[in-house]
Image (cartoon, grey):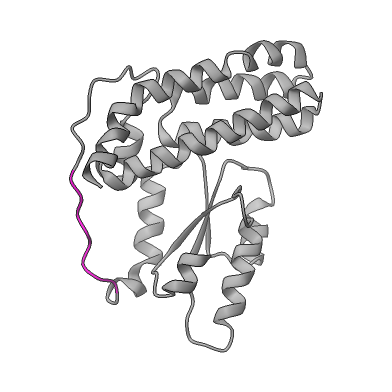
Amino acid sequence: MRKYEADPSYGLLLTDFHMPEMDRFTLTAEIRQREAGSRRHLPIVALTADALPGTEQRCLEAGMDAYLTKPIDSKLLATALEKWLQAAALRQPAVRTTKSAAAPKIDPQIFDTNRLVETFGAVNTEALQFLAQFIGEARKIVAGLNAAMAGESWSDARHHAHALKGAGSSVGAVRLGQLSSDIQDCLDADDPDTASLFVGGLEATLEELVEAVQPLIATVQVES
């Protein structure tokens, strides 16, 4: 929201459902309130792993313009960008190009760089900054999941597992995303004991991911 207040000329907002400071509905309401009485309308596209019936309608009724489910289909994302950026394209500055990072060899079962390429067009600075942000958020989610499991709050645990599954699949964290999916499946099946066994491997799996992608993320720090 702070970035929007500083520069309201953005052409499109892609918003996740789960954010630390302001949820997607509050964010949309704030923006629509600020636009009231003006000719401005910032296209807002929701991104979420929640594919439940009625979710899309809730997004549209809240003032959002479109809705995409995770893992994000690159073709659907491209279609949404083409549709909602048409009106804004003429007023946007020239696209800033960034250097692609020289990608070291990474086990594709741990991290699939193709997911970043599908979303960003290349493993570039913007993509790697996104990856670094994901890792920071993943640590928080894993901590929340551990706390929920310890407190036998199965609903909260499922929420954390679901969020980590969707985010991990979208960014390319293959093994982490799959493990999170297994945890969610166990909780959906009312099997917290097996879920606990899988949760025990989450931190090691996350650190495995961090170790694998650290050479990539380091290139952002060097360039900046």
Q: Position of residue 2 (x, y in %)?
A: 51, 66
Above or below, 53 relative to 110? below
Asked whether the viewer can see residue 43, the reply is no
At 72% from the left edge and 27% from the top edge, which residue is drawn?
147
Q: Nearer the viewer, residue 192 or 88?
A: 192
Residue 108 appears left or right of 203 = left
At 68% from the left edge and 58% from the top edge, which residue is drawn?
58
Q: Nearer the viewer, residue 28 or 51?
A: 28
Q: Is residue 10 magenta?
A: no
Asked whether the viewer can see residue 41, the reply is yes
Picture quadrant of residue 60: bottom right
Which residues, given as a range, are shown in magenta?
92-99
At 34% from the left edge and 27% from the top edge, which residue is drawn?
213
Q: Position of residue 210 (x, y in %)?
A: 41, 25
Q: Position of residue 169 (x, y in %)?
A: 47, 32
Q: Residue furthest right?
A: 152
Residue 67 appears left or right of 117 = right
Above or below, 16 relative to 193? below
At 40% from the left edge and 38% from the top edge, which residue is drawn?
132
Residue 144 appears left or right of 72 = right
Q: Nearer the viewer, residue 77 or 156?
A: 156
Q: Is residue 96 magenta?
A: yes
